[in-house]
């Protein structure tokens, strides 16, 4: 399944279960809550961190579909942009620089 297909499936699950489709503030807050749960699972060394990260992804996929964002395309573009960035250690801190 592609990211695009997962995005549509996450949205369809929201439709099927009559979950929120219109309150964007709520969706961002729910996504934030899932990130917090994933951190808590990792921090407390519970075995559920993978499941919690899956919840983060599912909320992100659903929100992307609600907003009409092609998340797969955006990820591909951003990863390529990040790949081309140049970083240097300056005063012990790795920082992005415009060019070498």
Image (cartoon, rainbow, N blue to C red):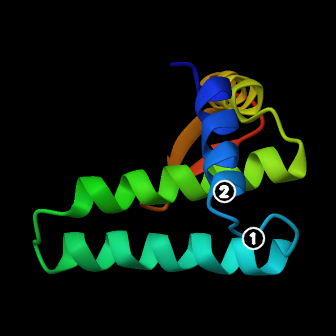
Q: Which mark is residue 20?
A: 1
The image's mark for residue 83 is none
Pointer 1: residues within 10 angstroms few (<14), some, or many (20+)? few
Q: Residue at x 72, y 27 (%)?
A: 81
User: In this rendering, would 88 be left or right of 64?
Assistant: left
Tell whether 95 sits left or right of 80: left
Q: Residue 44 appears at what percent x and percent y?
A: 14, 80
Q: CA distance from mark 2 to mark 1?
A: 7 Å
Q: Relative to 98, is 55 above or below?
A: below
Q: Nearer the viewer, residue 15 or 67?
A: 15
Q: In which image quadrant can residue 42 be found? A: bottom left
Left or right of 68? Residue 94 is left
For the point 19% across and 63% down, the residue is 48
In the image, residue 37 sits, relative to residue 17, either above or below, namely below
Q: Residue at x 68, y 23 (%)?
A: 76
Residue 84 location, x and y as percent? Answer: 67, 22
Q: Secondary structure at mark 2?
A: helix
Badge 2: how crowded within 10 Å, few (<14), some, or many (20+)?
some
Q: Position of residue 90 (x, y in %)?
A: 53, 54
Res. 14 mark: 2
What residue lies at 76% left-to-right and 32% top-to-bottom? 74
């Amino acid at each position: 399944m592609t990211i695009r297909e997962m995005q549509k499936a996450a949205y369809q699950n929201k439709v099927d279960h009559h979950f929120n489709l219109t309150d964007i503030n709520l969706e961002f807050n729910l996504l934030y809550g899932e990130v917090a749960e994933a951190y808590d699972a990792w921090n407390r060394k519970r075995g559920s961190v993978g499941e919690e990260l899956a919840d983060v992804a599912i909320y992100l996929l659903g929100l992307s579909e609600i907003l009409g964002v092609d998340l797969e395309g955006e990820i591909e573009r951003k990863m390529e942009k990040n790949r081309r960035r140049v970083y240097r250690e300056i005063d012990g801190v790795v920082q992005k620089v415009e060019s070498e």
